[in-house]
């Protein structure tokens, strides 16, 4: 995803945007992938889920000071409203997202 496309997605999304910064070689990233997929399915239509490969898009990762992966960021209204690094269990991730968005 190009920088312009990412910026447009974040700023123009009709729903909050959850971004998973990952790398193919990252074990914890692979372990959280099913959790992120489940999240996308459960919140379909209410939350946009995007995966950014830090090896292919280091500029996007650098802009958001992603230093460890997986890094999880939640955007609402074009701004970061929540962030975490490391793999979280599904229920903890769901709780954090719903709390951050006031759902």
Image (spheres, helix red, strand yellow):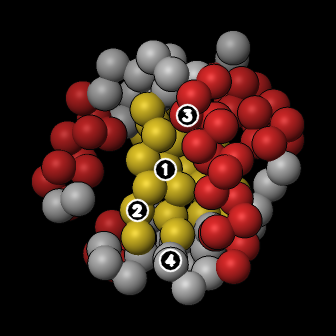
Dot 2 or dot 4: first in sequence order is: 4
Which corner quadrant of the image does residue 82 belong to? top right
At 17% from the left and 61% from the top, the residue drawn is 2
Which corner quadrant of the image does residue 25 belong to? bottom right
Q: Which mark is residue 19?
A: 1
Spatial CA span between label 3 and label 1: 11 Å
Residue 28 image point, x, y percent: 72, 73
Give the residue at mark 3. 40
Residue placed most toward the observer, 74 or 36 = 36
At 52% from the left and 69% from the top, the residue drawn is 22
Dot 4 or dot 3: first in sequence order is: 4
Residue placed most toward the observer, 41 or 65 = 41
SS state under label 3: helix
> Relative to 16, is 71 on the left or the right?
right
Are the two marked residues, 1 and 2, in contact with CB atoms closer than 8 angstroms? yes
Residue 40 image point, x, y percent: 55, 34
Residue 12 image point, x, y percent: 24, 29
Dot 1 or dot 2: first in sequence order is: 1
Give the residue at mark 2. 52
Give the residue at mark 4. 23
Are the two marked residues, 2 and 4, in contact with CB atoms closer than 8 angstroms? no
Dot 3 or dot 2: first in sequence order is: 3
């Amino acid at each position: 995803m190009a920088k312009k496309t990412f910026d447009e997605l974040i700023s123009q999304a009709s729903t909050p945007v959850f971004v998973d910064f990952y790398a193919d070689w990252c074990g914890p990233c692979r372990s959280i992938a099913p959790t992120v997929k489940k999240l996308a399915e459960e919140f379909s239509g209410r939350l946009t889920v995007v995966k950014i490969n830090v090896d292919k898009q280091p500029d996007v990762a650098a802009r958001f000071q992603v230093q460890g992966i997986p890094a999880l960021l939640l955007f609402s209204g074009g701004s970061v409203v929540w962030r975490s690094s490391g793999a979280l269990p599904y229920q903890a991730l769901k709780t954090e997202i719903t709390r951050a968005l006031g759902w």
